[in-house]
Image (cartoon, coloured by chain):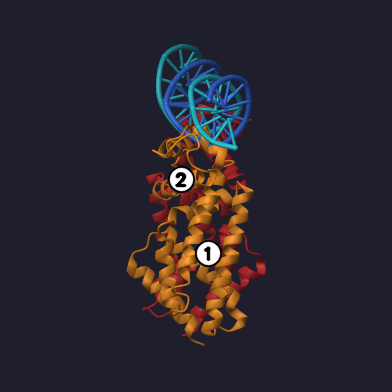
Chain colours: A orange, B red, C blue, D cyan
Amino acid sequence: MPANKRQQGREEKRAELLAEARRLFIEDGYEATSMAALAKAAGVAGNTIYWYFTDKDDVLLAVLNAVLSDVLTDYRQVASAPLEDQLGWVVRQLQQMNRLVSTVHTRAALAPAIDEWHTHFHLITESLFRTALQQAGVDRASIDAEIKIGAFAIEGMLTHGLDDAQQRAICQRLAQQWTNG
Amino acid sequence: MPANKRQQGREEKRAELLAEARRLFIEDGYEATSMAALAKAAGVAGNTIYWYFTDKDDVLLAVLNAVLSDVLTDYRQVASAPLEDQLGWVVRQLQQMNRLVSTVHTRAALAPAIDEWHTHFHLITESLFRTALQQAGVDRASIDAEIKIGAFAIEGMLTHGLDDAQQRAICQRLAQQWTNG
DNA sequence: ACCTGAACACCGTTCAAGT
DNA sequence: ACCTGAACACCGTTCAAGT
């Protein structure tokens, strides 16, 4: 039950809407969360959201950036750990937003802004991946392919609800591939 | 402009609707194809579709099965080719339905019937994968992980519009991993 | 059994009106 | 500048009425 009528600044209120959207998109999914439901959860009229976001995809964009920002911040703590542990950490970290992965792919085909974010996301993550693999001494010839294989494996693990043993086996196999010749 | 009023049998008419749905879902995408648009393309009233399919997800299910059936039939022709060629062939074959991959993941979270199909699909394809990898002599210890990595790589290549060189590099790297110790 | 026009509940979004 | 109730166009789906 947030304060109404500008007791609070614009950014503050926007952040409140964003937090609610983040919770609902992750818990219920983007498709299953109507703008009306989001508005109700935030305690405002349905159309009020449009004062702070241009449309529903813009809300998604803000949620994606918030989650990505948090994950990137936390990543620094494990950036120097062994590759296998890094992989496992990333997968566990992103597990919470597994529904958002498919959503991004679906919306990217329909909303240019989401498509752009998706490209941007892969540039960032693959750049981090490259640094990690170079430090591990993977040879330059196959590093591009390895990066894609790793990124796709992470996406796959997120979207396909594997159990812990399967995830560990995959992380292990990938890391083993990279820490050998 | 298909014949109306039972000049044709039920299965025939259903097949006609299905063909139109397959074309539209692949060309425009599932989300972008409204039931009204599908009906119009097939030359029937909007609600007529519901005489042949229980709902939109049921249409998707039929399209998925039709495509899968075709791909599995054609697969026999390359089942004995080298692994790298098989991989490339599968990716090229499934490329046409790249939009459907994300759709399946998104709808699987919302429609139990699609979720079931998705599980079924992975059982079938991973079983084929296992046969191929066993024939190539991949050791039993890591074969489960390799299958998942391969399946996720294929999904990733489909959903991320890589160019030919990138796809070849990935197929090559995976096959190389499997044809060595 | 098959097909339809009209209606229904819901969706994202817009607009005119308020403060 | 911010917020709202009412409306709009569209969506998937249902229903009563036709043949």
Pick the residue in front: A41 or A148: A41
Secondary element at tag 2: helix
Query: Which residue was labeled with disc 2?
Result: A16
x, y percent for residue B6:
52, 26
Q: How many marks?
A: 2
Secondary element at tag 1: helix
Quadrant where the N terminus of chain A is found in the figure: top left
x, y percent for residue B112:
37, 46
Image check: C7 left or right of B166? left
Tell me where residue B40 sits by quadrant: top right
x, y percent for residue A20:
43, 45
Amino acid residing under circle 2: Glu
The answer to whether residue A107 is seen in the rendering is: yes
Amino acid residing under circle 1: Ile
* As drawn, B57 above or below A129: above
Query: Which residue was labeled with disc 1?
Result: B154
Pick the residue in front: A126 or D2: D2
x, y percent for residue A126:
57, 69
Q: CA distance from mark 2 to mark 1?
A: 39 Å
The answer to whether residue B101 is seen in the rendering is: no
Q: Please check whether the numbered discs 2 and 1 fall on a single chain.
A: no
- Using a 10 Å C-alpha cutoff, classify the residue at mark 1 as few (fewer than 14 neighbours), some (14 to 19) or many (20 or more): many
* As drawn, B180 above or below D19: below
Residue found at x 48% / y 72% = A76
Residue found at x 42% / y 73% = A171
Farthest residue, direction bottom: A181
Q: Chain of mark 2?
A: A
